[in-house]
Amino acid sequence: MFGTHYRIERKSIALAVTIMIVASIGGLIEIAPLFTIDDTVESDPSMRVYTPLELAGRNIYMREGCYACHSQMVRTLQDEVERYGPYSLAVESKYDHPMLWGSKRTGPDLARLGGKYSDQWHTAHLKNPRDVVPQSIMPRYKWLSESQLQTKHLGDDLRALRAVGVPYTDAMIENASDDAVAQASPDDDTAGLTKRYGDATQIRSFDGDKATVSEMDALVAYLQILGKLSDAAHQPPPPKE
Amino acid sequence: MVSGLTVSERQWSMAILVIVAFVGLAMAAAGANRADPMQAHGFIVLLFSLAVFCFVLRDYYQPEPAAARLASYYDDPSKAGIVVAMLWAVFGMFIGDWVAWLLAFPDLTFDAAWSSFGRLRPAHTTGVIFGFGGNALIATSFHVMQRTSRARLPDQFSPWFVLVGYNLFCLLAISGYFLGITQSKEYAEPEWYADIWLVIVWVVYLVLYLRTLARRKEPHIYVANWYYLAFILVVAILHVVNNLAVPASFAGAKSYSLFSGVQDAMTQWWYGHNAVAFFLTAGFLGMLYYYLPKRAGRPIYSYRMSIIGFWGITFFYMWAGSHHLHYTALPQWVQTLGMTFSVMLLVPSWIAAANALLTLNGAWDKVRDDATLRFMMMAAVFYGLSTFEGSFMAIRSVNALSHYTDWTIGHVHAGAMGWVALITFGSIYAVVPWLWKRERMYSPVLVEVHFWLALAGTLIYVFAMWNSGIIQGLMWRTYNDSGTLTYSFLDTMVAMHPYYVARAIGGLLFLLGAIVGCYNIWMTIRRPSELPAASGDIPLPVNLQPAE
């Protein structure tokens, strides 16, 4: 063994190739089967996609680095299920490019946040968390209500997501900008939006200001949908065959 | 520095800089057209390349260097890299300590988007890992590969391309976070165009390394080079696979990663854990294997331990990433594989650490007297401790408690401060007098001061995080007599406050140490040269055949 090495360490290309081979094995064996074994991701035909407004909100969540302090992954441990809700399934982040499972809970897990608090609570909390939770150490995000959401190019975002596997239709891509505005404008015509994204789509002014669509609207719309794209986690597990 | 380049190398530099400037201009124009933050990055690229262009132009008409330069090693890029690494160290550690204070006192910041915790935190991690660590690795690798090959760098242009190009990447990464440009993948936050640029820089780095090895006058490739080579090669694989993404538009910064959900999570932590393995471990073991024996004046203890340690680390580490995903939606068979290999990883890790410490046998009096060597010894000790802790935390039932808590943060910093930063400071204190041809550092006392500040800072930090992590993990799972959870999340968060203050104090001591180091290095450089080149520190003639 050491004799072989004595020869390899005298040839730089042989050494480089050996390093590449030895280092590739682990990743190949652990990652490649995740794409081919059907059990890896549960199936949920009724799962819906993010609306353009929710997607914009998700991008704001990423831009502000929320994932650094909040996980979106309830582990299969009793205390987590009792604290946050049903443990997370792989299918729930099937359309998440990238996933936001997180690695640290400086703040609580958000996988089941949707519907837990009112829009008013979220807006006030994001503007200054200590107005609502005096001991909170979360940063203030008051500029979110002041900045208007850029919706013009959301169609490009949907098209890119379709390229990586999210089933957005041509109509969704074409109407992305209008749909984003419509979702935060309950008084406007929202028939097209519900036709494309389903009746369960939450349509309201999330930041309480109907006049404009702000980044706050988008972020709160996203927070209110967390854990609600799929019901799979709330179903009893299928009986073993 | 420019006067050391040949005229054709100066022309190459200027041509490349003009191309990069035009790319920057195109990015700025495209971004402006879409009101996209890429616009700002375009201007940064443009200004950066124009500034470097002016720097080259200033000395363009200087006479060409004499052919005598080929008789000595080419160290200008190493010198620049070390200075830049120390500047990034102060920047990254300052941001790190700032965010540490923010966790104790959340309003200690400006009322602006760029200065909120979520945007500062990746600026800290990128600043210390890629800015400080990466530049130190590039600078020392140029130094080490020439000495261990007894050969000069094959040309003078590509090392500068690697160093300057890499720092442009770091600049794009960190300015991006402040501007809100991020992929949100931890330790792989930069967007697609910065990632592509890093690939170009990295390929030039690999080719430079292989060309230098090809010119070597020693028949055997020394251990330090195995590690540097593994660092370059595997980081390339990890970077390319984990950053596969589709941009929303080539005129905009935003992209969407190719993988989603569970596959993305596994790819991300395969990357994340092996960034620790091949960026923060392999590269720095390369440093350790050269500077520790040189400074101690002792040969490496065991050749066979070097081999087992190296291949064990190269093979086992790549399986370990899934221990970041215990009890998640990742299939259990992958979790079990990750845990198993993480525990086995302890063997090669401790072999490498033991090989370093046993090398010091017969030189322990030097460890006592010489703070530079003590930096390296303490780094090997922390390497051993944090790899033990890592294997322990990868066990599923331990991970159930430690994951998502500050214990992870403490573990990372035991490795990052105790191992990575200490070996880097030790190596820099060893190499600075060699590179600038000084008898010793300006002030050995300040090296001593830095050592104790760094050690105290690390210990305070790590103990604070052990306490907060374990306490919070236990509080989350505490049930009362009626069978319900005892503590709300808020209760457990409030309990962290004293440890967050202690951690920020530890970080402050560490930062102060780095500032003292900068001053000491600056004064060493400024002091007039006293020594001629150390005898024997020259490459062997080009036409000499390797000795068999």
Image (cartoon, rainbow, N blue to C red):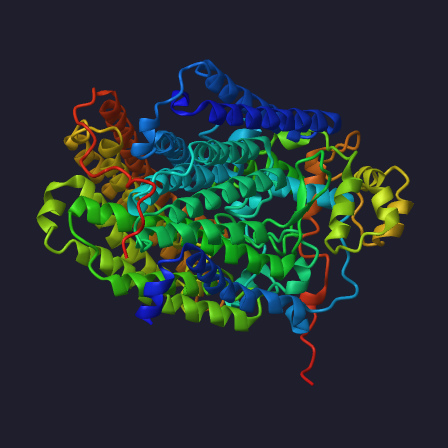
Q: Quadrant of the N terminus of chain B?
A: top left
Q: Is residue B348 above or below residue B238?
A: below
Residue A63 x/y as whole percent: 61, 39
Depth check: give the residue in front, B279 or B158: B158
Residue B42 x/y as whole percent: 62, 27
Q: Residue at x 23, y 25 (%)?
A: B524
Q: Is residue B497 above or below residue A200?
A: above
Q: Is residue B24 above or below residue B245?
A: above
Q: Quadrant of the C terminus of chain B?
A: bottom left
Q: Is residue B378 left or right of residue A115?
A: left
Q: Residue at x 78, y 46 (%)?
A: A159
Q: Is residue A113 left or right of residue B477?
A: right
Depth check: give the residue in front, A197 or A13: A13
Q: Is residue B444 left or right of residue B398?
A: left
Residue A128 x/y as whole percent: 56, 34
Of all residues shown, which one is farthest toward the bottom? Answer: A241
